[in-house]
Image: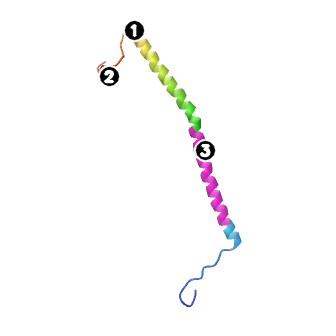
Amino acid sequence: MRLDGGVIRPTPSWPLRLAGAAIVVAVLAGVIAVAALAFWLAVALVPVAIVAGLVAWAAIRFQLWRARRSGRDFGGGGDLFTH
């Protein structure tokens, strides 16, 4: 402490500065790794979503085909809750 009441801050040694820089680099690398994993997962799920959509579309078309074949009409225009 100085005579006027001020505090003298010690300057950190070079190993402490190097450790601080290493911690910052490690945290940034972790953030980038998590972001890359999230992006990879999202890109990997795109084909799954497309296939699921195609299967759902085919199932609806098949149900409509069966309904038309049996003489029922699901063409729309009516109330869905009165069938």
- Find the distance from the CA under tag 3 to the CA under tag 1: 50 Å
- Find the distance from the CA under tag 3 to the CA under tag 2: 43 Å
At label 1, which amino acid type do we have?
Answer: Ser
User: Circle 1: is it few (<14), some (14-19), or many (20+) Cα within 10 Å?
Assistant: few
Picture quarter containing residue 71? Answer: top left
User: Circle 3: is it few (<14), some (14-19), or many (20+) Cα within 10 Å?
Assistant: few
Q: Which quarter of the figure is the N terminus placed in? A: bottom right
- SS for callout 3: helix
**Range covered by the magenta-colored residues:** 19-42
At label 2, which amino acid type do we have?
Answer: Leu
In the displayed structure, would residue 34 be above or below residue 10? above
Looking at marks 2 and 1 on the same chain, the residue that comes earlier in the sequence is marked by: 1
At label 3, which amino acid type do we have?
Answer: Leu
Looking at marks 3 and 2 on the same chain, the residue that comes earlier in the sequence is marked by: 3
Looking at marks 3 and 1 on the same chain, the residue that comes earlier in the sequence is marked by: 3
- Find the distance from the CA under tag 2 to the CA under tag 1: 19 Å
- SS for callout 2: helix
Tag shown at residue 80: 2
In the rendered image, residue 23, in percent from the top left (x then y), is placed at 64, 61
Residue at the image point whose x is 65% and y is 76% from the top = 11
Residue at the image point whose x is 60% and y is 41% from the top = 40
Residue at the image point whose x is 60% and y is 52% from the top = 31
Residue marked by disc 1: 70
Residue 9 drawn in magenta: no
In the rendered image, residue 54, in percent from the top left (x then y), is placed at 51, 24
Please give left or right for residue 37 compared with residue 65 in the image.
right
Assess whether mark 1 and mark 2 are in contact (beta carbons under 8 angstroms).
no
Assess whether mark 1 and mark 3 are in contact (beta carbons under 8 angstroms).
no
Residue at the image point whose x is 39% and y is 8% from the top = 70
User: Circle 2: is it few (<14), some (14-19), or many (20+) Cα within 10 Å?
Assistant: few
Residue marked by disc 3: 37
Residue 31 drawn in magenta: yes
